[in-house]
Each structure stands twice: as structure tokens, then as C-alpha cells.
Image: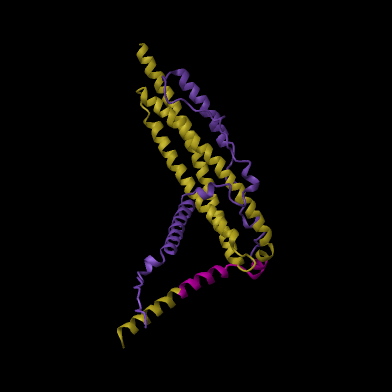
Chain colours: A yellow, B purple
Amino acid sequence: MKKSTRLLIVCLMFATVLSGISLMGVAAQSATMTDQQIELIRSNCVSAKNTLNQLHASDALLRVNRGQIYESMSTKLMDRFNNRASTNGFGNTDLVAVTKSYGLMLDTFRLEYIGYEKQLALAISIDCPNQPVEFYDAVLSARTKRNQVNVDVVKLNQHIDQYQSAVNQFEKDYQVSVERLKQ
Amino acid sequence: MDEPKIEIAVNEGSFRSKHRFLLLIALSILIASTLVLISMAMYNGSGAAQLDLSRPGYKEVRAQAITNDSDFKNYSSTGPINQDTISEFKTLFAQQAEKTKSVDAFGGDPLNPDALGISVPSEQ
């Protein structure tokens, strides 16, 4: 047998195995859903899609407005106070650390939102009367990603609280240093 | 009496010199298409697409976007640090923190299949 023929046979076998694995995945997903559920998705998917479209728009607005506020918290307040403390020769290590961590969390929030928006757009684009299972799976995936974005928002709020605590500590340290100077 | 035939040598030239204008147009279209593809990839990949409320589908919410954040006061990054300036910052920060945390952004569970009406309890 020629070497090229052997190579062709190996490639064909590999492709067959890969197709089999992917088909098994699809079958596994479909197996978890009853016919009744598939029919329900098919009949309600148009109204579900309308809801998804509204959510898509309202979440985009939320992302723009919230993102702007979270950005301003950092650029208009935290960074500026840190700079001021630094230029006046005060130790601001804790403040800088919280600000840095907040910035990283903000980056995570932005990335997670992109992932969520793409997944929601994908769910909306699915032809749900003909692909009800794919539509359901896409909605579930978007739901998970949206919950993750919410977790990021909660963490950002926690960072804001941490910064407030760091400022309180900074104030206490400042008062102690002033008292020492007076003595 | 036959007149002598004068043969004019026609310079056929290369394909490039013959179709210079067409090549210019084709090349321009190719370059423009490549640049559009690159910019679209950047637009989609950078997250700008997600913030772009001028896209179709966002018409209803476009007007509600915050375009003027003048109520978000800048804290001066220069000047002395004393009890007054620290207190001023704390007040400013507390105000904005309150506003920021007042909204449960992306909370709730609107994508719950039950809420969307696409879920039924599986048969036992």
C-alpha cells in the first residue's frame, strides 16, 4: 500500500472519531431534555426572544452607565487622592494596593461583560423554532455569564468599601502623626 | 507600382502597463477591505462594540445613557493634606460610593428558563 493511501486512511479514521465524539456530545445534551420541554421551548421561544432583546438593550445601557461610574471612582477620586497623599510625603501603600486591585477587578468586569454580551447575542441569533435545544443551552450559558458579571459588580462594590476603610485608616495615621508633632 | 509597406512595431508591453488603472482600482479595494476587516476585528474584540449604543437595537435606550457626569466632582490631585482635605475627600467618596452601590447591577435572574417560559419540570 502506498504511503499516501495509508496517510489518507489514517486521516479519515481520525475525522470519523472526531465526528463521533462531537455527535456524542450533542446526543448527551439532547438526552437531558424531554419532548415536552422541546415543544415548550419551540412554542415560547418567540416571546422569550423578545425578552432577550429587551434585556440585551437594557444591559448594554447598564454597562455603559455603570462602567462610567466605576471608571470615575478610580480616575476622579482614588487615583487623585493617592497622588495627593504621595506628593505630600504620606505613606499610601494600602490605598495604592486597593486601587490597583480595584483596577484589575474593573478589567475583569469589562472582559466578563464582553463574554456575556456575545453569548446573549448568540442566543438571540439562534433560529429557536428549528434549534430549540441549542437555544436553551445558549440561554443557560448566557445566564451563567450574566451571574458572573453580577459577582464582579459585587466585588467592585467590596473594593469601594475596602478603599473607604483604607482612607479611614489613613486618616487615623494622619491624626497620630499630627499628635506626635504637637508633643 | 506597389508602395512599400511600413510596419509599425506595436509595443505590446506587459499586462501591468496595459491595465494600470484597473490594477489601481483592484488594489485600492483590496487594501480598503483589509483595513475594514482589521478595524472590525478591533471593534469587536476590544469591547467597543458592547459600549456602542448607536448600533441598531439600542435606539430605545440610547437617550438614557449618561452623557454628562458633572455631578461627579473631581478631587484635586494637588494641594496639602490636612484634616479638612481628608474630610472633604471622605464626604465626596462616600456620596459617590452610595450612588454606585445603590443599584444592583446585573442582579436578579431574568435569564432563568422559568422566567422566560422555556422550562418545564422533567417527568419523573
User: Is A131 within the magenta?
Assistant: no
Question: In the orientation shown, which residue stands out farthest toward the front?
Answer: B1
Q: Residue sitting at 46 percent across and 72 percent down?
A: A21
* Residue A63, above or below B16: above
Magenta span dominant secondary structure: helix
Q: Which residues are magenta?
A: A19-39
* Residue B97, above or below B59: above
Residue B109 in view here: no
**As drawn, is A153 to the left or to the right of A9?**
right
Q: Residue sitting at 53 percent across and 39 percent down?
A: A68
Residue A22 image offset from top left, x and y in percent: 48, 71
Residue B16 in view here: yes
Question: In the orientation shown, which residue stands out farthest toward the top?
Answer: A183
Q: Nearer the viewer, residue B1 or A162?
A: B1
Q: Residue sitting at 45 percent across and 27 percent down?
A: A167
**As drawn, is A164 to the left or to the right of A60?**
left
Residue A134 image offset from top left, x and y in percent: 57, 65
Q: Nearer the viewer, residue A52 or B19?
A: B19
Residue B25 image offset from top left, x and y in percent: 45, 61
Q: For the C terminus of chain A, which image quadrant?
A: top left
Q: Nearer the viewer, residue B74 or A95?
A: B74
**As drawn, is A63 to the left or to the right of A98?**
right
* Residue A2, above or below B42: below
Question: In the orientation shown, which residue stands out farthest toward the bottom?
Answer: A1
Q: Residue sitting at 43 percent across and 39 percent down?
A: A103
Q: For the N terminus of chain A, which image quadrant?
A: bottom left
Quarter occupied by residue B115: bottom right
